[in-house]
Image (tube, coloured by chain):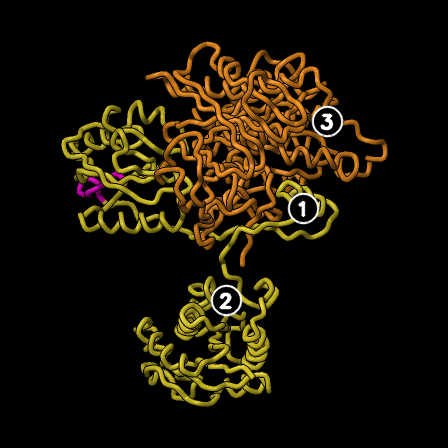
Chain colours: A orange, B yellow
Amino acid sequence: MRLEHCVYAVRDARFGPETRLEGGVLTIDKAELLARINADGFFAEVDADLARPGESVRIIHVMDAVEPRLKPDGSPYPGALGPVAMAGQGRTHVLRGLAVLQTGARQGIQEGVIDMSGPGAAYGSFSRTVNLVLRCAPPAEAPAIAFDQAARKAGLAAAQYLAEATRSLVPDRVEVFDDAAPEDAAGLPRVAYICHLQSQGVLRDTYVYGENVRTLLPTILHPGEVLDGAIVSSNYIIACQKNPTWLHANNPVVRELCARHGRELVFTGVIIANEHSTLREKSRSAKFAAKLAAQLGASGVVLSQEGGGHADTDLMLCCAECEKLGIRTAMLINEIAGPRGDQPSLVDTTPYATAVVSTGNNDEVVSLPAMDRVLGGGEVTGVGPAAAAFKTALGRMYTATNQFGALAMSAREQ
Amino acid sequence: MFRVVHYLNQFFGQIGGEDHAGIGPQLKDRPLGPGLALQAALGDAAQVVGTVICGDNHIAQNTEQAVDEILALIAPLKPDLLIAGPAFNAGRYGPACGAVCRAVTQRLGIPALTGMYPENPGAEIYRGDVLCLRTGGTAAGMRESIAAMAKLGLRLAAGETLGPREDEGLIPSGVRKNVWLDKTGAARAVDMLLERLAGRPVTTELPMPVFDVVAPAPAVADPARARIALVTEGGLVPTGNPDRLESSRASKYLRYELAGVDTLISRDFQTVHGGYSGVFVNEDPNRLLPVDVFRELVREGRVGSMPDYFYTTTGNGTSLENSRKFGAEIAERLKADGVQGVILTST
């Protein structure tokens, strides 16, 4: 299979009379955009703002981030937006450097914060992108589920709408993801990637080709499918450790393994497995994922997590099952070591977990300065007015310790 | 030449054994006991300008006051470095060395170094705040330990930044801090896996933590005579969450009244827990906190009584430190109310 990302670099965006991309600047017809994302009139109100790296802007209530993409003859997020079609083949237009951020409050859901400048900007992937920040207000008495579905679709629709501007343009560059390995790859180690998704109930769900993976028996995806919008997030708990749609479609582990495919290793495929709510399901999933890795002939796997707490058990069981089958593992996990960093980092362990990459301690406290402008809401949950300076655990900082290893952060004993 | 003050207990300070463990802090203007070896190891680079001695029992029983007095003896000597011990595996001497080193570092801003056996309780308590050389369990290793402490101490006095504790022979701090590395987590994970597949050793970034093992309490002998309370970490609160219990990373626990409440109804109670779908709880809060069934059991005489309140918090990314504190306080309050058992519903 061969996937081509036609990359259109965006260095700035602004609102204007017509949506078009010129010289790396995306002009957005705001009225047309808003009409598109509220086509059926579900939302009581929709609005959009822009935030750029380096600006004195704080974005709060962040729910999801989506990369603007266009599949010229289909949907860039098939199943979740438009009909199901197999992803991972052909050409996909990508607006690189721009993110659509869906914002809003959800009951029982913790805050997600992005600072576009200052010390907080180091923690997360979306302080470096130009962001189109959506605010979609639900109609009175809308059920949480209906609102969330509509908001998710609106984010994806906005992403597709923006990338439409590239339809007839020549890309800045083309990234090719081709699974054909050179003939001399025979001696290279075969490596699979077990990507844990977290789907555990409304507002903490993940979708693959538009379907919820809550009851998923682990299955195999082609790396190209992951990079082509097969996975869409609807999971909003603990902001620092979320894997938003943007990060699924740019999964850093998949990209890393693709880049080394045929040179240092043979990338045999992505196994997606859900993090379940009961031990019985966790155990079944772990054994099955390990079996699939063996079926792919993998001698090693990278494992990644979403969320934490009892999700540690899913990772540890899966690690142990792989190692018992003789498949070596390396895991990506973040830590809950307490504000001082002196508490146990995980809630579950296995003696097999001897190769772990830490993506940082969620509990470490950062001081955020006051900001001139706030988008996404007015008050940070549990803090107060969002424009003011405040201290917070990294837990609130959107994707700060995400376990795809997008950032170069780690935690170390001093 | 650097000025060094040495801290010793009554035994190593050559005052006496256990019968002198109660003596208060005192200052000698010369090296004593292990201090002679320390002075020899420091050579011409530093001089032991004073030895502060305190009895192990005295400092153990009045730590705060004793440390104040010790600091008052040390400060006028204007040292560039404090060396305490080494304490090896001595169970009161270790914490004393830790307390003195921490106070000297934090309150006087003077570098300090102690040495002890990793299992000394002083290491566990103070390793996060204090530099502590890893020593053997007994004073048989005095010569090597003193030599190593002199060497490290001179570097500290010179203002040098030490390398990772493990590499310097120090006991790891047990404190993890976020750091920025050259490569992304994804690249490091693939590197680590390829190293393993090539048969080369790797160093994990996260050694597995060791957990406390909590032995379950013995069963309540006769529930029909027992007072049993309901407690949950499932984020149950009165509707509207008047006290703003967090959805995750809870900073508090709360107590709510159940007087006259025979069953929980969704109009009055809801969950704010962010770690599971609250739909089933919000439909019928008894599913989380079984007040309905429990009232029945009390009426039927199968449970003696239940308090007319429950305790609640959110167990979702909540720190171990907070969880320990909540647990201890809730248990203490329940105990004061004559409660013998708890139904603790977890989610």
| Residue beneath disc 1 | B192
Q: How many marks?
A: 3
Q: Amino acid at mark 3?
A: Asp
Q: Is residue A50 left or right of residue B186?
A: left
Marked residue nearer the N-terminal end (2 or 1)? 2
Residue mark closest to the camera, 3 vs 2? 3
Residue visible at 47% across and 80% down?
Answer: B79
* Magenta stretch in the rendered image: B222-231
Q: Quadrant of residue A87?
A: top right
Chain name for mark 2: B
User: Is mark 3 in CB contact (under 8 Å) with mark 2?
Assistant: no
| Label 3 – label 2 distance at C-alpha | 59 Å
Q: Is residue B195 left or right of residue A338?
A: right
Q: Is residue B69 left or right of residue A99?
A: left
| Residue beneath disc 3 | A172
| Label 2 – label 1 distance at C-alpha | 30 Å
Residue visible at 35% across and 39% down?
Answer: A384
| Residue beneath disc 2 | B118
Q: Is residue B65 shown above or below A120?
A: below
Q: Amino acid at mark 2?
A: Pro
Residue mark closest to the camera, 1 vs 3? 3
Queried whether the magenta region covers residue B224, the answer comes back as yes
Chain name for mark 3: A
Residue A177 rendering spot, x and y as whole percentages: 73, 27
Say which element carries label 2: loop
Residue B38 rendering spot, x and y as whole percentages: 54, 84
Q: Quadrant of residue B22?
A: bottom left
